[in-house]
Image (cartoon, rainbow, N blue to C red):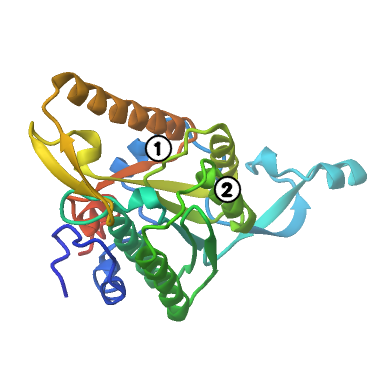
Amino acid sequence: MADITLPARGAYADLNELIALRFPARQLRLARKNRALSALAGPNKSNFRGRGIDFEEVRSYQPGDDIRTIDWRVTARTGSAHTKLFREERERPVLVVVDQRNGMFFGSSHCFKSVLAAQLASLIAWSALDAGDRVGGLVFNGAEHREIRPRRSRKTVLALLSQIAGYNHALPLANASAPDSFADMLSNLRRIARPGSSLFLVSDFHGASREHAREHLFQLAQHTELTAVACSDPMESKLPRAGKYAVTDGSARSELHTADKKLRSIYQQRFQRHRDLLSQDLLRLGIPMLQATTDQAPFTLLQQFYGDPRQ
């Protein structure tokens, strides 16, 4: 098995490597909320209140009960205060959402963002299954998507990884993604995500600032526990040192000139502005954002926030 402390490698994900990540994933505990992760969510808490819960019964109100659970209909009918009792789900649905659009088919060192996303998604899925959660997901490429319904099953995780690998190997697509592809994905996610679900959205978040996308994120944050994992490549944040570089999209080649200081400054500022706006939008919703880069090991990033203290 490859050294998990090293960055992912290659232009395409290897299904066998994604499957093998089930072993290091046992060292992660997604339900563990350390201080670093809590700080990323900011002081504003979302309306999410823990795992999914099912209504169980109504009983007379007792001192100390949460007034938000008072059943006003029963209270009005009986003349005395009654409160609802709920039963917490033993297993929470965990949905791993993986972006495999053309924009993810990019990398300047070690691997492409699409490969980074695949490995992060695999680690998250295996860790959730190991914790006894029901695991499913959604893979999208801007033209279509595939849903995997959450189940507590190794076969379901393997099906999810197979879909991720299939979408990954189809890159690059002949047709570019639609402008609202990110918002369309979130719309589909809202349809399948049950209240109380834990969602991990692994993407470069291109299109997340559009109005429809922001509204969908707001709605999802009200009823689910959403974690953003933003993938990027070092060359997206900063151009390489001055010189001429050959670049390719897999079919055509061209030269990139990076000697212009003004161009370099504008390029860097544009990326930072986009990342700051995304971070602020998510912070307002109480959504933590993990920043993953292609020159960093996926396992090392997740271990920083979800490492099992017993290991």
* Residue 55 against residue 103 in the figure, above or below: below
Q: Nearer the viewer, residue 69 or 242?
A: 242
Name which of mark 2 and mark 1 comes first in the sequence. Answer: 1
The residue singled out by tag 2 in the image is 184
**Which secondary structure, mark 2?**
helix
Q: Quadrant of the N terminus?
A: bottom left
Give left or right: position of 187 versus 165.
right
Image coords of residue 143 (percent x, y): 52, 55
Q: Nearer the viewer, residue 110 or 287?
A: 110
Image coords of residue 71 (percent x, y): 78, 45
Q: Nearer the viewer, residue 125 or 77?
A: 125
Image coords of residue 105 (percent x, y): 32, 53
* Residue 116 against residue 279 in the figure, above or below: below
* Residue 184 against residue 118 in the figure, above or below: above
Estimate how packed mark 2 is, as few (under 14), some (14 to 19) or many (20 or more) residues with alpha carbons within 10 Å.
many
Circle on res. 41: 1
